[in-house]
Amino acid sequence: MVNLNDRLNELRQKDAEQSARWHAENERVIQQIQAERELFGRNIRPNLRVARPEDYARWLRGFMEAGGSPSHTFDYRMPSDFYVAVSSFDLPAYYGAGSIHVIVPQNVKVTFGDIGHNSLYLMENFDHVGSWIPVYSDIVL
């Protein structure tokens, strides 16, 4: 007959091992995010300035005048992950909360392999690359 305390100890050991694996994976993900933030700050951010609502409104107006339609509306202000490219650069694929929105002036080139969850709003022909075109409460056309 199996001792019930031995079974409890086995369960505790399994839980401790699973917890250790989870903590190790969590630490790996945190380090990866920190490394990506450092690379963004060093390699990408110098090519950008924070976008103002009127920057995005200028693009959105041209996009809609050309027949485009926004994909989402929000009842809050434009978030701080909107930028205007001030020089050309290669955009890595960022996903989820790490993704960014970039308004690209006509004289600037933003290249990319995989767009990830990023969005590019191209002033040339008021085109876009990415999956959504949001409208925020502080956007006035």
Image: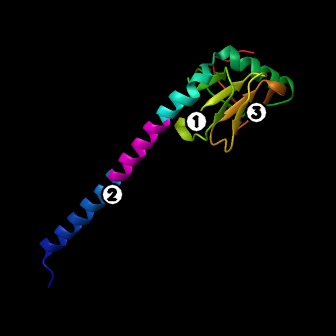
Above or below, 118 relative to 20? above
Magenta run includes residue 32: yes
Asked if one can make out residue 59 in the rendered structure from this viewpoint, the answer is yes
Relative horizontal placement of residue 60, taking residue 15 as reference (left or right): right
Q: Which residue is mark 1?
A: 99
Please state which amino acid type lies under the numbered disc 2.
Answer: Arg
Q: How far is mark 3 from mark 1, CA to CA? A: 15 Å
Seen from the viewer's position, the closer of residues 90 and 51 is: 90
Q: Main secondary structure of the magenta part?
A: helix
Disc 1 residue type (three-letter) = Ser
Question: Which mark is on residue 21?
Answer: 2
**Mark 2 near mark 3, Cβ–Cβ under 8 Å?**
no
Residue numbers of the magenta segment = 24-36
User: Which element is circle 1 on?
Assistant: loop
**Residue annotated with mark 3:** 128
Q: In the image, residue 28 lies at what x, y percent?
A: 39, 48
Magenta stretch holds residue 126: no
Q: Is residue 118 left or right of residue 65?
A: left
Quarter residue 86 falls in: top right
